[in-house]
Image (cartoon, grey):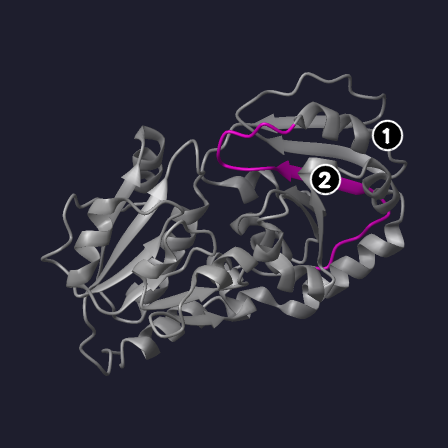
């Protein structure tokens, strides 16, 4: 079936690197696929290192060095806005920012985020930028995911703190979780290979980031992440989650926390007792699992693309 409208071409500016991680690219890649399925043509410009470019190419994207003459709508998924982009953005309308953490949100005419951190709210000028907050935007990368009922007689945890370089002591976290009574295994995605003593009867699996984390995490029933897109991807699968985050970024996933499917713990003061208590209480984890199932995140995955089309006036 042909699209009802002739859509404007949409340019994406996306940041992806070992420093900021691949979450922006994962989100924008899913959004590109969703828009393409609705008949919208897209072009991609990257602010990336070699790792980011390789990841984009592995997802099948062609990378343009200059999109100024190729599109009229701009979508920005980046933390840092270079001066060159600020100048270039004047050629586009609407200019849509989809990253809740950004050093210059005033570049955007519209800001679409799953939650609005306080710092973002302070920077936005209502007369200049329209801020649209919708928790459903969190599930843009969950298209095609099928949630499933999990059993919690035993716990198999998955850990992926960030696609970026991360300073958290992952071995300390693994050691802590291994001490909990109902744990069978821990699967870890991290650039660093954890060197830990594995208790008798328990298992530790490790993989480096490879673009297909949920193949590696196919057996887990609990997820521990940072504050990026994988939290919503886990919850869309019915898997409850912990977000190890910072005070400044905690608000990014407040709606998921309010749903009961996620618990946020600050990395500045990781509460060892609260993590141990949670992993020792299967009833609490099962309640989080039920909350994740009730959200049915996969059914919400098209909300961001539909909102963008509405903004474009189509």
Which residue is at a point 74% across and 25% down the rendered structure image?
A: 172
- Counting the numbered discs, the total is 2
Which residue is at a point 79% across and 33% down the rendered structure image?
A: 177
**Residue identified by numbered label 1:** 179
Q: Which of the 4 quarters of the picture holds residue 225?
A: top right
The image quadrant where one finds the C terminus is: bottom left
Q: Is residue 268 above or below residue 79?
A: above
For marks 1 and 2, the one nearer the N-term is 2
Image position of 147 (left or right of 79): right
Q: Is residue 44 above or below residue 55?
A: below
Image position of 201 (left or right of 230): right
Circles 1, 2 touching at the beta carbon (< 8 Å): no
Residue at mark 1 to residue at mark 2: CA–CA distance:
13 Å
The image quadrant where one finds the N terminus is: bottom left
As drawn, the label of residue 157 is: 2
Q: Residue furthest left?
A: 69
- The residues colored magenta run 149-168
Which residue is at a point 52% across and 51% down the rendered structure image?
A: 229
* Magenta-drawn stretch contains 152: yes
Q: Is residue 270 above or below residue 286?
A: above
Residue 61 place in picture, x, y as percent: 27, 46
Dominant SS of magenta comes to loop
- Label 1 neighbour load within 10 Å: few <14, some 14-19, many 20+: few
Residue 108 place in picture, x, y as percent: 32, 63
Q: Secondary structure at mark 2?
A: strand
């Amino acid at each position: 079936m042909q699209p009802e409208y002739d859509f404007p071409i949409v340019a994406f500016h996306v940041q992806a690197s070992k420093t900021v991680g691949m979450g922006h690219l994962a989100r924008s890649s899913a959004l590109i696929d969703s828009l393409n399925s609705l008949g919208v043509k897209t072009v991609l410009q990257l602010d990336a290192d070699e790792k980011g470019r390789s990841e984009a190419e592995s997802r099948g994207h062609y990378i343009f060095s200059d999109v100024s003459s190729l599109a009229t709508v701009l979508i920005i998924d980046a933390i840092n806005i270079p001066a060159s982009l600020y100048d270039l953005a004047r050629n586009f309308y609407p200019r849509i920012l989809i990253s809740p953490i950004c050093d210059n949100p005033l570049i955007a005419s519209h800001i679409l985020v799953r939650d609005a951190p306080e710092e973002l709210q302070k920077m936005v000028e209502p007369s200049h930028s329209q801020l649209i907050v919708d928790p459903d935007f969190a599930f843009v990368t969950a298209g095609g995911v099928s949630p499933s009922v999990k059993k919690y007689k035993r716990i198999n945890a998955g850990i992926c703190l960030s696609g970026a370089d991360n300073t958290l002591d992952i071995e300390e976290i693994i050691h802590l979780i291994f001490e909990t009574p109902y744990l069978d295994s821990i699967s870890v995605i991290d650039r660093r290979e954890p060197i830990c003593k594995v208790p008798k009867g328990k298992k530790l699996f490790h993989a480096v980031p490879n673009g297909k984390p949920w193949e590696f995490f196919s057996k887990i029933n609990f997820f521990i992440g940072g504050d990026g897109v994988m939290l919503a991807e886990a919850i869309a699968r019915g898997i409850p989650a912990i977000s190890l985050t910072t005070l400044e970024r905690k608000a990014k996933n407040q709606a998921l926390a309010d749903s009961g499917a996620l618990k946020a713990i600050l990395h500045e003061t990781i509460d060892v007792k609260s993590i141990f208590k949670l992993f020792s209480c299967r009833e609490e984890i099962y309640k989080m699992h039920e909350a994740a199932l009730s959200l049915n995140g996969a059914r919400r995955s098209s909300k961001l693309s539909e909102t963008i089309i509405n903004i474009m006036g189509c």
